Image (cartoon, helix red, strand yellow):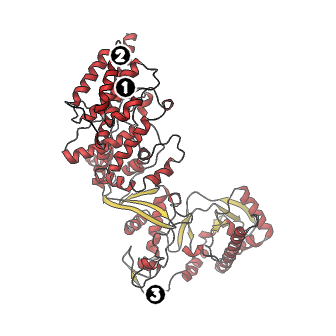
Amino acid sequence: MLKALYDYAVREQLVLPPGYVRKSIRAYVSLAGDGAFFGIFPGSEEKVPCPDIGSMANSGDKCNVLAVRRSILFPHDTQPAGSTKKSEREANAAKTSYFSRTMADAAQAEPRLTFCLHAMQDPGTAAAVLAELDRMKVRAGDVVSFMIDGQSILELPGVVRWWEQFRRQFAPDPDNERKVPCLITGRLTVPMKTVPPVSGLSVVGGHARGDALICFDKDAFCSYGLKQAANAPVSEEAFAGVKAALDDLLADAPILAGMKFVHWYDKPMEAGEDSLSRIFGAIPLEEDGGSDGEEVPAVNPHEARRQADALIGSVKTGRPVHELPNQYYILLLSGVSGRVMIRDYQQGNYHRLTENLRQWESDLALTNSAGTGLMKPAKLSARLIRLITRQNADQKVFERLGKELAGLVPAIIQVILNDRPPPDAVISRALAYIRSQMFSAPEEEQTRKVPDPWACQWLKAWLCRRERTLYQKEELAVEYNANHPEPAYHCGALVAVYGAIQNTAMPEVNASLIDRYYASASQTPALVLGQLARMSNYHLAKLEGLKIYFANLRDEVACAIGDSIPTVLRPEQQAYFALGYYQMCAKLEQDRRARKAAAAAKANA
């Protein structure tokens, strides 16, 4: 894993010289060639290489140099008095003193740095700088540096040479330290005692100042008398590459159930061509597009193979196509108590991955609730909401996602990447979500009750993989399959027909038979379907033009059930029931739209 991250950093040219890290500089204090204060120059969004002394910057009397927090560079006593604020001011004062001493030392190599010291220490200049920083809303925790004659002090040749000499006091003496092979590069090195923290995990339990990837602070974690990070020896240069890679990858990594989903390839991949980003990336939650009456085009289940197809097709067309990667790498990361927690790590063959992603999208393929096409594509982060406890007007849904599915999400990702059957928890959670939805208050529902489409997609994927595993065949289709051999599937479809008959005959009814009987019918259909049949005869008698249509459809579905109606449905049979109900609802809506379109065409003829 470390070697793969290091190779990524080298390939993307993220590796910095030892002693540097990339930081976002919020603003520069701009000084003229004679030291006069010019104003505040805003920093760029792009991170720049800055000197870094590692974890020692968090100690009480030390800080980084040349680019530090505003509260260290220009301390002030505007905060209210108090023991906590007083201790913070004292710590800042110690760090400011250390910063001033290092700047004075650097000024011997680059005399113009004396202007920076004067700007910090002269009351009039410091007041003008603070006023301008406040005007530009530069906060106390923002990183600030200096510019002289329009050039950042970080780029001055004298400063660069000084830092190369100055930083040696923080590195071990290679002549007095035992060299061991680096875990990343394999070359002999004096291992780092502590490694710099990795940024980007604060939103998933990490610390704001970063989290340690290699940490041995307990005796139980140490061996052979080694201390701290020497138990996993890495060179400063190699780990700088690992940290740069993680910082870069974590910046745009989506969040899945309280974890960062980090992935990369051994060769460059365009963002729009990355199948993993399409499936696992974060998108806003959106409903099934079929419910509003607009047609949704079918999703191409072979989209994940587009790159491979393009490479083969380039032989005929002559169009250039970049080389496909051979390997993919995936990390699930979170932060715990200042440490990086690796929830899962996987690498594998990219071509096998594309086949597995294609199969996953094929297993999910399902008609929308209007029957006008396939459902819109969605990312995993949105689908996972259908596996947690359903709540109305939930404002912290993604927070609950991380708590309720922390142990399940890594298993689901393994299912997708390796074409495995989903765990049983998926089907039980999706069924619980559907039951809760079908129990919801009438004012929340539309004119017809349809199970949540994304929850039904979980059921279909689970059932498709079960059928392939147990029976080496697959009977489920994207639309209602009248020839499916499972009786529970047609029991659900028959309940949907009964509901449509009542809704057509009595559209203003307060509590429909679906409200009253769906839950019991989905678990004990033999006890309920007879009563629903008698009610259906009463409702069917009220219909006129659609009486024959509904009667024929009802009889066809009833015959598909077979000789006997199941008494009690197991969880997998309940999944067939819900899917049959959903797909029949889509067929009924599709037929209704077809009748409406035919009537409109006849009227306009």
Q: Can residue 593 be seen in this view?
A: no
Q: Which mark is residue 177?
A: 3
- The mark found on residue 499 in the picture is 1
The quadrant of the picture occupied by the N terminus is bottom left
The residue under the point 46% across, 45% down is: 283
Q: Give the residue drawn at x 22%, y 45%.
A: 468
Residue 454 at least partly seen: yes
Q: Residues within 10 Å of mark 2 (few under 14, many from 20)?
A: few
* Label located before the other in sequence (1 or 3): 3
User: What kind of residue is marked 2?
Assistant: Ala
Identify the amino acid type marked 3.
Glu
Residue 330 percent across, percent down from the top left: 38, 59
| Nearer the camera: disc 2 or disc 1 | 1
The residues tagged by marks 1 and 3 sit, at their Cα atoms, a distance apart of: 80 Å
The C terminus, quarter of image = top left
> Label 2: which residue?
598
Q: Which of 195 and 415 is in front in this view?
A: 415
| C-alpha separation, residue under disc 2 versus residue under disc 1 | 24 Å
